[in-house]
Amino acid sequence: MVLTLKVTDDLAARLRPHEEELPRILEFGLREVSADRLRGFEGVAEVLETLASLPTPEEVLALRPSTSFQERIDALLEKNRVDGLSQEEEREWERYQYLEHLVRLAKAKAKGRLGAA
């Protein structure tokens, strides 16, 4: 299927080097839009939107969770330590761990790009 999108010139210029990856980028974006409607994805949208904006290596390395996202992570860690997590909270925690994995991969690649420059 062929899909035509209207985007700004700036976005088109940023996407052009990633033409081969556009289906995957769109898939990730759709997952995030769907996930944003579900509980337990607070903060995830912000992180993925930043990565999807094709940031510079320096911006990737500077990426940190928002205050509210970090507070949710801390709350889950504390609850797990004191009472244990419910099944829903466990799934939420697993999503956050996977997001952290993705951010670490992005940071490793960004560091490699800076080292190669």
Image (spheres, rainbow, N blue to C red):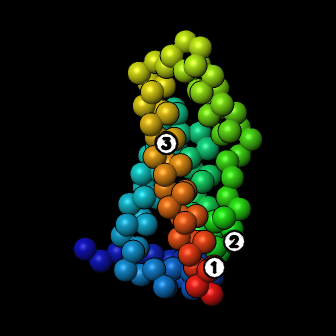
Q: Is residue 96 left or right of residue 3?
A: right
Determine the secondary structure under disc 1: helix
Q: Residue furthest front?
A: 115
Q: Earlier in the sequence, mark 3 or mark 2?
A: 2
Question: Residue 6 or 49: which is nearer the viewer?
Answer: 49
Label 3: how many residues lie within 10 Å, few (<14), some (14-19) or many (20+)? few
Q: CA distance from mark 3 to mark 1?
A: 26 Å
Residue placed most toward the observer, 5 or 20 = 20
Residue farthest to the left, as pictured: 1
Q: Are marks 2 and 1 in contact (CB under 8 Å)?
A: yes
Q: Is residue 1 above or below residue 42?
A: below
Which numbered marker is on residue 114?
1
Q: Nearer the viewer, mark 3 or mark 1?
A: 1
Q: Three-letter amino acid code at disc 3?
A: Gln
Tag on residue 60? none
Q: Amino acid at mark 1?
A: Leu
Q: Position of residue 48 (x, y in %)?
A: 55, 56
User: Residue 97, labelled with which disc?
Assistant: 3
Percent position of residue 25, x then y: 43, 66
> Can the viewer see residue 8?
no
- Give residue 86's position: percent from left, percent from top: 46, 18
Q: In the displayed structure, would residue 112 be above or below residue 49?
A: below
Please provide percent x and percent y for residue 78.
63, 22
Residue type of the residue flagged with mark 2: Glu
